[in-house]
């Protein structure tokens, strides 16, 4: 008998025809949740393996995830474009070294169309529950409209940056002006001539603050903790440079050079916080060069080890804060009133618009979901002592449920798309094991998961994210890092290159 690829052989007895306007019989071999880089990447590799019995359930009306939702002024990637893309679909035509949101979103749509993924996407399907049927060895996936889809495996590609986080400030709900989160930018509001307040100084804020500073009559930036900022080595690729990158091997060579350049940044992160002296010196020099006012410079100088929070890239944020119509407030906000914000000194700042640049509820993204695994085990009960997975992909008690960009697979130095591709390859390996053994499901062994997490936290504890003297969104409510991978990305790639069957229980 001739060899058939995994997609043809896997669960062929359960194959169902899927129409383009919906799931015709409410069954599918695999359900992918989310159509960002993770969901689209997973779908592309399934198609490449010859497997077509899958759907992508997307809550929005278009694909794109983070790059669809974040449309704030100045939104762009802080990882070089030639690295922040699929390794199998290099783009020699990026306009800049750090591409803007619109260009990245267009790249994702183009990839989905090119690889035949778009017909598999079901828009407006917000998944509200996942429940494992022990008898049938299958998952029931329930969407907000009440539809229940039965499937053999679920791949969650929801990511972590999609639930906006708002600060708990007294009176936030009484404000009578316009208020919105940067991830839900209200483009109907003209900021020209307005008194605007920005709460938060994270990765998004440092991109949109310089843009709205040019429009607002008065911009007040409320800073809780100053970020460490490096200059952003951004530039436009000339037509000549883009033509050169179309030469055979040129784009690949540039990508490889960028990869290793970014990977060297992990030395201080993954080995010893004392090695962060070089990036700290660069950041302090950048601050000194761009902020001549010594008092403003003092308020913008962090008091924690660089890298403890995400290192940001910007060459126009500091100059924006030096504009005459911009003021920086470093005293804590105590109250929001109908038309103003009160800080800890009692000063009242009258504002017309509030923009929250306060990030996302990262550790809540998975824990808030209704997921019930074997014997009705709820994900909240499985993680009552903290989120634990195996390589951020599998979690004990939830067979054939795979996470992409799951816990402890985030990065502070390189491209998460690289991590996604490593995880997709690992999931494909799991599916091939099911195909070879004729098992219905696989479930990671609890003892292997516990050992993996014990060693993971042992590595994380002395590193800069835990020991750098700051409180960041990397840490959960107990101060445990549930977000970042503690090593180099090539290490993660090597350790997930082949899944180990002995780490899993096969369910027949």
Image: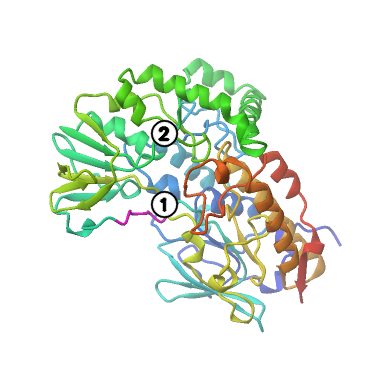
Residue 436 versus residue 221 in the image, above or below: below
Q: Is residue 2 left or right of 122 when viewed as pictured?
A: right
Q: Which residues are magenta?
A: 162-168
What is the quadrant of residue 437 in the picture?
bottom right
Badge nearest the viewer, 2 or 1 = 1
Q: Are marks 2 and 1 in contact (CB under 8 Å)?
A: no
Instruction: Tell me the residue at 53%/47% (across/down).
Output: 37
- Which residue is tagged 1? 360
Instruction: Tell me the residue at 43%/65% (across/down).
Output: 126
Which quadrant would the N terminus be assigned to in this image? bottom right
* 2 or 1: tag closer to the N-terminus: 2
Q: Secondary structure at mark 1?
A: loop
What is the quadrant of residue 39 in the picture?
bottom right
- Which residue is tagged 2? 100
Counting from the top left corner in percent of width and height, residue 417 is at: 58, 43
- Residue placed farthest to the right in the image? 1
Most frequent secondary structure within the magenta stretch: loop
Residue 153 versus residue 480 in the image, above or below: below
Which quadrant would the C terminus be assigned to in this image? bottom right
The label number, if any, that marks residue 105 in the structure image: none
């Amino acid at each position: 008998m001739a060899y058939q690829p995994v997609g043809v052989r896997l669960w062929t007895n359960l194959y169902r025809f899927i129409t383009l306007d919906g799931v015709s019989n409410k069954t599918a071999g695999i359900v992918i949740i989310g159509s960002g880089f993770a969901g689209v990447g997973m779908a592309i590799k399934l198609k490449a393996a010859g497997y077509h019995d899958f759907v992508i359930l997307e809550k929005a009306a278009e694909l794109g995830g983070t790059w669809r939702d974040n449309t704030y002024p100045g939104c762009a990637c802080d990882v070089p474009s030639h690295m922040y893309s699929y390794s199998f679909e290099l783009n020699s035509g990026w306009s800049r070294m750090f591409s803007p949101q619109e260009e990245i979103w267009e790249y994702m749509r183009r990839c989905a169309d090119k690889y035949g993924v778009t017909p598999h996407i079901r828009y407006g399907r917000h998944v509200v529950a996942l429940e494992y049927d022990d008898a049938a060895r299958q998952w029931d996936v329930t969407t907000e409209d009440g539809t229940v889809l039965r499937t053999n495996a679920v791949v969650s590609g929801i990511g972590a940056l999609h639930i906006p986080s708002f600060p708990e400030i007294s009176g936030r709900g009484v404000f009578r002006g316009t208020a919105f989160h940067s991830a839900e930018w209200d483009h109907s509001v003209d900021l020209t001539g307005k008194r605007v307040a920005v709460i938060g100084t994270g990765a998004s804020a440092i991109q949109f603050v310089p843009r709205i500073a040019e429009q607002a009559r008065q911009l007040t930036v409320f800073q809780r903790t100053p970020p460490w900022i490096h200059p952003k080595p951004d530039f436009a690729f000339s037509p000549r440079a883009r033509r050169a990158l179309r030469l055979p091997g040129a784009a690949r060579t540039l990508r490889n050079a960028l990869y290793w350049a970014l990977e060297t940044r992990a030395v201080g992160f993954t080995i010893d916080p004392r090695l962060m002296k070089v990036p700290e010196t660069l950041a302090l020099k950048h601050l000194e060069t761009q902020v001549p006012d010594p008092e403003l410079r003092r308020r913008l100088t962090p008091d924690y080890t660089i890298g403890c929070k995400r290192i940001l890239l910007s060459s126009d944020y500091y100059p924006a804060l030096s504009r005459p119509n911009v003021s920086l407030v470093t005293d804590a906000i105590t109250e929001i009133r109908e038309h103003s914000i009160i800080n800890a000194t009692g000063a009242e700042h009258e504002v017309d618009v509030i923009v929250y640049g306060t990030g996302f509820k990262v550790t809540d993204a998975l824990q808030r979901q209704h997921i019930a695994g074997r014997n009705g085990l709820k994900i909240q009960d499985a993680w009552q002592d903290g989120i634990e997975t195996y390589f951020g992909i599998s979690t004990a008690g939830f067979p054939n449920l795979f996470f992409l960009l799951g816990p402890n697979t985030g990065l502070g130095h390189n491209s998460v798309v690289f991590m996604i591709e490593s995880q997709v390859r690992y999931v494909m390996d799991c599916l091939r094991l099911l195909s070879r053994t004729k098992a219905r499901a696989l479930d990671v062994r609890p003892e292997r998961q516990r050992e993996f997490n014990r060693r993971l936290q042992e590595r994380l504890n002395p590193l800069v994210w835990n020991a750098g003297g700051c409180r960041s969104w990397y840490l959960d409510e107990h101060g445990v890092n549930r977000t970042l991978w503690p090593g180099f990305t090539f290490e993660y790639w090597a350790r997930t290159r082949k899944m180990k069957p002995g780490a899993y229980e096969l369910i027949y």
